Image (tube, grey):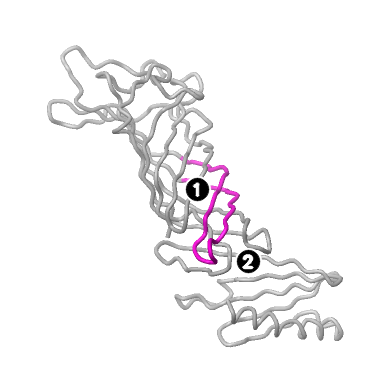
Amino acid sequence: MKRIILLLLILAPIIAMAQDMNVKDTTLFVGSRKITIKEREGKIKVKLYEESSDGDTIENDQIFEGVYMDGQSTERRMILSIPFTKKKYKGRFEPHYAGLYFGYGNLGDGLSLNNADGIDLVASKSWEIGLNLFQGALTLTPDHHWGLVSGLGYSYNSFRIDGNKAFQREDGATVLASAPTDVTYSQSRLRYNSFRIPLLLEWQNRLNNRSPLFLSLGGEAEIRCWIKSKVKYDGHERTLDKNLNVRPVGINLLAQAGYNNWGVYLRYSTFSIFQKDKGPELHPVTFGLVWHW
């Protein structure tokens, strides 16, 4: 951080010289960092690049951007994290999305979570596990308290159905059907996988100038795939049905809170998991713990 501040102090007289000399584009190299200065329509834009740790070209890791116009300036810092390589950005905005999480799930009907649309779940055995693979952030305020966070995540959801019933399709619609008279399900599950892309507004504040306390809230696009209704009886697990009229794309509301690398989350699907008029009205809800890297 001290080196970046020193570089920015060095930039100040260079920017002034560029204004006086009417220089349109300038590129400087200071150690492993690259600085570009461009002037367009009375604005001077300064970008600072840092060489990435894996040896990629320095243009691939932009860490600072400043725009100077009429004596005023705006700044923007960008952060991109990949799995298990999280850097600590002391004094800077540190996003919280990438990580590993586990939570218990339920299927709601609006605000009701008990026997929604006649579906009885075993709550202690209904869960999701997920891996948020990548994250990126855009700092919004100079004090590094506010930022926008996005990324890419993957999840696996499994809902345990109680009552010797299972989801299957009948006459083109998905229903919760009872097992045949001579069959008793020891397990019945609805399973699906999904890829998730969030857009979160995050607030954070470092305690004693150390790790941050954070809160975030926003939306999450969810692409569902590999949906199955699984049952187990006579000691064998079977796929009962795959074509369940599941809505392939959903929108979740996601809230997170925590400190440093640990947090809790609440996720609620605003759309029913099944297509309209082709299945029961059920909204997945999950709550759990997340470890951010």
| Residue at (67% x, 58% y) in the render | 140
- Which residue bears the numbered disc 2? 77
Quadrant placement of the C terminus: bottom left
Camera-near label (1 vs 2) is 1
| Foreground residue among 201 and 163 | 201
Task: Identify the magenta region.
Answer: 196-223
| Residue 146, x across and y down, in percent | 63, 56
Q: Which kind of residue does numbered mark 2 sit on? A: Arg
User: Is residue 51 shown in magenta?
Assistant: no
> Residue 217: within the magenta?
yes
**Residue at the (41%, 28%) spot, across then down:** 107
**Horizontal side of residue 280 vs 91, given as left or right:** left
The residue located at (46%, 56%) in the rendering is: 98
Q: Which residue is mark 1?
A: 257
Above or below, 59 relative to 240: below
- In this view, the residue in front, 52 or 216, is 216
Question: Residue 234, how many percent across, how many down?
Answer: 12, 26
Residue placed farthest to the front in the image? Answer: 208
Looking at the rendering, which quadrant does residue 3 occupy? bottom right
- The quarter in which the N terminus is drawn is bottom right
Q: CA distance from mark 1 to mark 2?
A: 23 Å
Q: At which x and y percent is residue 261? A: 43, 58
Q: Secondary structure at mark 2?
A: loop
- When the figure is inspected, residue 75 is found, relative to residue 251, above or below; the finding is below
Q: Which of the two residues, 24 or 135, is positioned nearer the viewer here?
A: 135
Q: Residue furthest left?
A: 234
Disc 1 element: strand
